[in-house]
Image (spheres, rainbow, N blue to C red):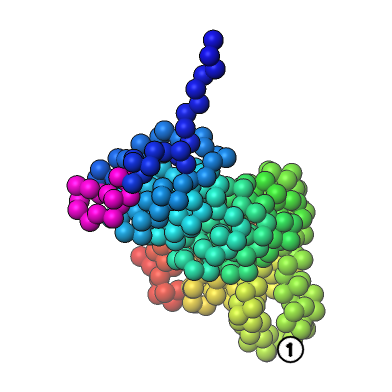
Amino acid sequence: MAAAQQEPAPSRTSGGDASALLTLARSRTHQDRQRLLLGVMALCDQHPDAASQELSPVLTDIFLTLARQAEHDIRHALSERLAKASWAPPALINILALDEIEIARPIIASSPILKDEDLLAILVKASLEHQIEVARRPNLSARVADAILDQAHPAPLTALAGNATAEISAEGLRRLVEHSRRLAALRAPLTRHPRMNETLARQMYAWVGAALRESMGERFAIADLRLDEAVDQSVDRAFTSLGYGAVSPPFVDDDRDEMDRRLVTKLQAAGQLRPGYLIRAVREKKMGLFRHALSVLGGFSMAQVKASLTHDTPEPLYYACAAVGIDRAVFPPLLYEIRQINGGPPGEAGQAVWQRGAISPQSAQRAFLALIGDGETPVR
């Protein structure tokens, strides 16, 4: 039996066919453009596995002419057909990768032709949307990932954090975690990242919300006590960086409130004021720091904060704490300690609203304002 005849590669397309396609490529009529598109697509369909073949100069010229002169829809169709082609001309692939984002997206996501140098060029030359697509590219190299980290644009960083297949080095992941201090969008994907470890999780705990803390605790089997220690250490570092040592200095009573306010203002300016600081302040029985920190974090007036601490029900205080990100599971022991410090208030009237389920910060803030008003005029 005769051996099966192999299908010819694109480089072996007949000269007549190639010349006809090239003539169509140089034509500007809509009908010729459509015929050209059909012809090119037929070539792509006929030779999907020509990885080891090189296109003839004529066919390369056809593709490049299409990329430079064809209408948007033809370039888009060409991009989708060549996205995974290992035989496509590198010059063509790079042109398409720098085209409009709808055209570039399939190429950036899948083309085996693009090398690190090409991706680095896209990061420098192309739009933010192109950079995001580079960050999402499967199996992205550590070299390109480091370049994205160096640029430090929020959207590409977020895309990189969500790219579980990217080759992010240990140092690169540490840098992403550090960026998550200021970029909340990084936190959720980082908690799910396959390379996240317990050390980095403990570091992140100080600035993530309640839901992510719970997720991190479950994934790394970190006990609450150890997580609380992470908060304590973070606050200690904040005090130390501001020149106050591990705890606040012993101020004269008459000046304490003003010094508490100034310390909270400095912590906020340094990016160190977070919900965990409220818990730390109550533990150390520093209610002045608690009041000022809650005021700054929640955007509440001091009158509103004080009113929630002396109210006949703990509901306003719960809503204020929920509005700044304190987990409802943390609130009961926090309330107990506050009552011990205050000698009773807030009162025990009303219901334990924190047992009803989670509430969003926005809803909690609205509920707080509805109960407290301006903090000075009783709400009816």
In the image shown, does 291 or 143 lie closer to the viewer?
143
Residue at x 41%, y 33% (from the top left corner): 46
Q: Is residue 32 magenta?
A: yes
Place of residue 211 in the rendered image (x, y in percent of width and height, measured from the top left): 58, 50
Indicate the quadrant containing the C terminus: top left, top right, bottom left or bottom right. Answer: bottom left
Tell me if 283 is positioned left or right of 23 in this view. right
Name the spot of residue 271 as percent of width and height, x first: 62, 74
Highlighted range, magenta = 20-33
| 92, above or below 298, in the image | above
Residue 159 appears in the rendering = no
Observer able to see residue 261: yes
Q: For the residue carrying disc 1, how many other residues have a C-alpha within 10 Å: few (<14), some (14-19), or many (20+)?
A: few
Q: Is residue 20 above or below residue 325?
A: above
Q: Residue at image x 48%, y 45%? A: 55
Say if the magenta span includes residue 13: no
- Percent x, y of residue 142: 67, 56
User: Mark 1 belongs to which amino acid?
Assistant: Val
Query: Disc 1 designates what residue?
Result: 252
Q: Nearer the viewer, residue 205 or 56?
A: 56
For the view shown, which residue lies furthest in the right direction?
245
Q: Which residue is at 52% across, 37% downward?
A: 50
Rendered location of residue 209, percent (x, y)? 59, 57
Q: Is residue 295 above or below residue 51?
A: below
Q: 320 or 216: which is nearer to us?
A: 216
Q: Main secondary structure of the magenta part?
A: helix
Residue situated furthest top in the rendering: 1
Instruction: Give the structural element (helix, strand or loop) at label 1.
Output: loop
Quarter of the N terminus within the rendering: top right
